[in-house]
Image (tube, helix red, strand yellow):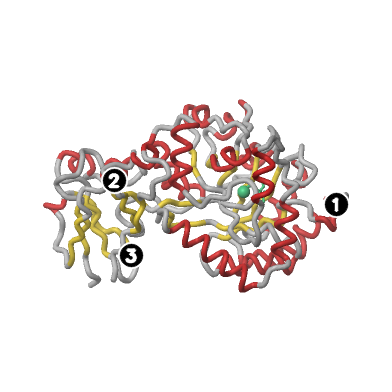
Amino acid sequence: RDAAIVVELGASAEAGTASDASAEAGTDTGASAEAQRGRRAVPDGVPASDDRVTWVGLAAAAPPADRVIDVGGRAVVPSFVDSHTHLAFAGDRAAEFAARMAGESYDGGGIASTVAATRGASAEALRARLAALVAEARAQGTGTIEIKSGYGLTVADELRLLRLAREVTGETTFLGAHVVPPEYVGRADDYVDLVTGPMLAECAPHARWIDVFCEPGSPHAFDGDQSRAVLLAGRAAGLGLRVHAGQLGPGPGVRLGVELGAAAVDHGTHLTREDVDALAGSTTVATLLPGVEFSTGSPYPDARALLDAGVRVALATDCNPGTSFTSSMPLCIALAVREMHMTPAEALWAATAGGALALRRDDVGRLGIGARADLTVLDASSHVHLSYRPGVPLARTLALTG
Ligand code: NIG
Ligand code: FE
């Protein structure tokens, strides 16, 4: 059989560390209440062939183990699930950020400069940049990462980005409908025909999801009808649905996503009561991206209205060179707690189980039996430190093998 490994938190752990975190992160550990009174949660992974958690409970009651890892009272959480990134690009837009901080506003127009840089970059350069960003994310506790195309906007360039993304994750998203590219300005419907026709046909085999930047008020993005056409075509091609909605102003994107059964609608900076009501009771996750508000200066989304209505909320970085050039899930957790009034437990759940739900996954984002043994140790006694100690690199991947 595979080597059994017990992860011991140690008797010095402050009450409510990993068992708390695992319970809050939506796990199925029946032993958590007991664990909180005793030696804290002990995920007993059986790594090797499939890296699955096979037992969770008190160390004293653990089945025989070949190896015991004592994490010395540190909190153990499921590795973060970053369900929204745009990591396949070249260049940066630091000057645009500086101009914004001096009073300019964001309208999506800067995306064209990243499209130009990305089209002009070699596959090797793009691959190296992508690998560096993924490594940066992993070093901060991210275990599962979604990556979108969207800076190519020709059939060949979108295909190239998706192939590169596919090399590092199974969670790839076709975002040909990111913006209308320069060569189609004034002909948005023609571009939608390209996206829903030949581009989708080439890209769909390399993607799990399709996404669209639905923002009728923007001259660069897509209106409700165009977005519907993109999503329906993607669905017909077998892709799951996601939507960029309500980033620059209220619009039809959230309700469109809910109506079509999207796994997630993302941003929600500007939400109406109707949007919140539509999300409540639906299976669509609201993914909040506070790195965007931090970097654009727009108001933070009303997370409390969503949570109080029973909507399932995820947190993600939206890592991209325009609106949120951070790969840090802990930063997003800290912003969610400080700026969006989520509790530390709600924020941890959103960054783990919420992200998993947004990707319709049940094998990540939790510490329960059957989940992947993809664990992160925090150099802290409690997950609360993720927001209590902002900017401090607390996350360490727990290497169960080797
Ligand atoms: O999620 N809103 C559209 N797309 C990205 C921004 C892309 C960019 O500015 O380069 C986002 O915020
Ligand atoms: Fe995005």
Q: How far from the left and from the top, in percent, is residue 294?
A: 56, 39
Nearer to us: label 3 or label 2: 2
Q: Secondary structure at mark 1?
A: loop
Q: Which residue is mark 2?
A: 380
Q: Secondary structure at mark 3?
A: loop
The mark tally for this picture is 3
Q: Amino acid at mark 2?
A: Ala
Q: Which residue is mark 1?
A: 185
Q: Nearer the viewer, residue 137 or 392?
A: 392
Tell me: 195 left or right of 64: right
Q: How far from the left and from the top, in percent, is residue 378?
A: 32, 49
Q: Amino acid at mark 1?
A: Val
Tell me: 371 left or right of 177: left
Q: Amino acid at mark 3?
A: Asp
Sequence-first tag of 2 and 1: 1
Q: Secondary structure at mark 2?
A: loop
Other-residue count near label 1 (Cα within 10 Å), few / some / many at <14 / 14–19 / ≥20 = some
The residue at 50%/61% (across/down) is 134
Q: Is residue 315 above or below residue 167?
A: above
Q: Is residue 271 above or below residue 49?
A: above
Q: Which residue is mark 3?
A: 51
Asked whether the residues under the numbered discs 2 and 1 touch, taking CB atoms below 8 Å apart as contact, a structural biologist would say no
The quadrant holding residue 46 is bottom left
The quadrant holding residue 389 is top left
Q: Nearer the viewer, residue 144 or 399?
A: 399
The residue at 28%/47% (across/down) is 75
Alpha-carbon span between mark 1 and mark 3: 49 Å
Sequence-first tag of 1 and 3: 3
Quarter of the C terminus within the rendering:
bottom left
The residue at 59%/38% (across/down) is 293
